[in-house]
Image: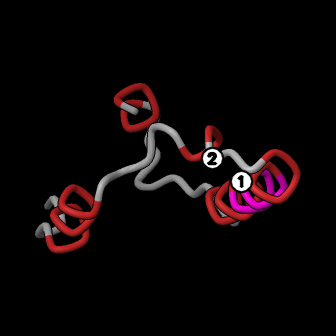
Amino acid sequence: MSKLADAGAARISAGSSIAEAAYGLVHRAARELLEKGTTATLEGGFDYATLNALLLAEPAR
């Protein structure tokens, strides 16, 4: 990110890519659950306490 700032970028955008990736994960997880009865696709996600802390955190300035 510092290279982008050094080049004069004030902000960057991922557009809809983050939401599209989340929808893809939901699709893969649902398919796995329905077809195999497993949930390995969901490994590595945040637990509720971590997610709540992230959502309640003050934005960086």
Q: What span is colored magenta in the figure?
A: 26-31
Of marks 1 and 2, which one's residue comes earlier in the chain? 1
Label of residue 39 in the image = 2
Magenta stretch, overall SS = helix
Q: Based on the picture, tell me whether residue 34 belongs to the magenta stretch.
A: no
Q: Residue furthest top?
A: 3
User: From the viewer's perspective, is residue 61 above or below residue 42?
Assistant: below
- Tell me the residue at 35%/51% (across/down): 46
Question: Where does the C terminus fall, quadrant-wise?
Answer: bottom left
Mark 1 is on which residue type?
Ala
Relative depth, front residue between 5 and 31: 31
* Relative to 14, 56 lies left or right: left
Q: Secondary structure at mark 2?
A: loop
Quadrant housing residue 50: bottom left
Amino acid type at circle 2 is Thr
Q: Quadrant of residue 56?
A: bottom left
Query: How far, Cα to Cα, is label 1 from label 2?
Result: 6 Å
